[in-house]
Amino acid sequence: MIELRLPHAIFEDIGESIRLIWRESLYADFPKKDLERVIRKKYRVESEITARDGALVIDTDYKKIENFIAIYIQNNLGALLRNRYTKRKVIYLHEGLDVPLLGYNAFGLIDRGTNLIQVRGVTGCNMSCIFCSVDEGPYSRTRKLDYVVDVDYLMKWFDEVARIKGKGLEAHLDGQGEPLIYPFRVELVQALREHPNVSVISMQSNGTLLNDKLVEELAEAGLDRVNLSIHSLDPEKAKMLMGRKDYDLEHVLDMAEALVNAGIDVLIAPVIIFGINDNEAEAFIEFARKIGAGKRWPALGFQNYVPYKFGRNPIIAKPVPFKEFYAWLRKLEEKTGMKPLVLKPSHFGMEKREFIPLAFRPGEVVKAEVVLPGRIEGEMIAKARNRLIEVVGTNAQVGDKIKVRIVRTRHGIYIGTPI
């Protein structure tokens, strides 16, 4: 009897297939008949395959099969990978694919002309917030696949960006979804902590995937702050806003306190939908004070709900002009004594820095190679001049060489239309 175990992976028997769960966030299903067939073809041995206690079990004593199946699984893993939370197909981006990590909004690195660099290693989310600006999560109607960027490849590109941007950088782990589903989350924080140009490492999170062990690992790795998305302190209202009946508010509140106790600063970041949760503002402030949030940075970052073209914009959410929103915040400051609530970049040590030079100018026509499918229908991702371009309204396929007119270059995010 052979029991095969792989690093950072567990095997589960799900009936007709063996499911490999890799680094908690990803999985791949291998049909048992396929595994048994390749063994039979290679070694002329009949075997039965199952899984037990996290191991792949093969009912044979022929030891050579163990290494063969391990290599087979590793070689075929990339084509079968899926996101455990969204169930969508995953494209694993590594150095061998030669895909640039600047130019696209969903993954890679984003420079908005300051000393803060957004670091996006993964797409997808375990929640489905009813106001999500990018229609993310398990119930998304528009997002059709996810990406994961290899941590070494991500850091290779970060090195280049940091060389241009200089020292005193804040590396902010965020994304179109939940950064904690990134399979290399701790390793990424460790690598950033060791980088000579990085002074602060922060993360956006809904907190649901935190546990005591992970909090300890992130603290030891060097995470400085978590911007924690908590939108209501009422359990039922919180479930409604997060779009999940299994949302455990009590757990998230416990984890907020655990972060502070571990030496990681916390900023409570509710999205305020007037008429829904604006009446909880003082309760948020009280909770932030109770757990000791905001030791180095502001304790709260109230956000004004804004509808987006490709987001989920519920009927119950009525947008409020920012002028009124800021007036509301100033009244809260006066009433509660909690300052600052009207936040400025200076509160986070942010300063203007020269942009990474743009690779294209608006209106320019460029020749590009399609390298990846996009996240929504009619979108593909092309590369040119070592940058990515989101090409919209196209039926091109991966590998095609196309002409693209650049229509948007803001913050080094390139969008183009086919010609």
Image: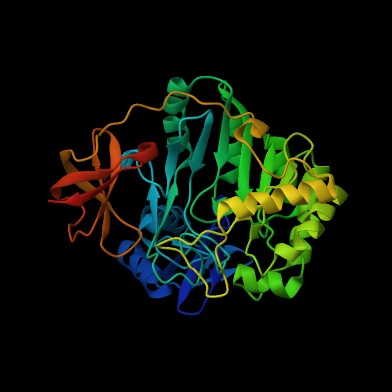
Q: Residue 258 appears at what percent x and percent y?
A: 80, 49
Where residue 377 appears, as percent x and y from the top left, is 29, 65
- Tally the marks: 0
Please give left or right for residue 148 compared with residue 323 in the image. Answer: left
The residue furthest bottom is: 15
Q: Residue at x 34, y 26 (%)?
A: 357
- Residue 101 in view of the camera: no
> At which x and y percent is residue 371?
25, 48
Depth check: give the residue in front, 177 or 418.
Answer: 418
Front position in the image: 322 or 43: 322
Q: Quadrant of the N terminus?
A: bottom right
Asked if residue 54 shows in the view, the reply is yes
Residue drawn at point x = 48 percent, y = 50 percent? 122
Residue at left 57%, top 60%?
A: 320
- Left or right of 389 on screen, residue 365: left
- Is residue 386 left or right of 245 when viewed as pictured? left
* Percent of width and height locating residue 84: 52, 64
* Residue beneath the point at 50% across and 29% down: 114
Residue 4 vs 407, above or below: the answer is below
* In the rendered image, the vertical position of residue 17 relative to residue 337, given as above or below: below
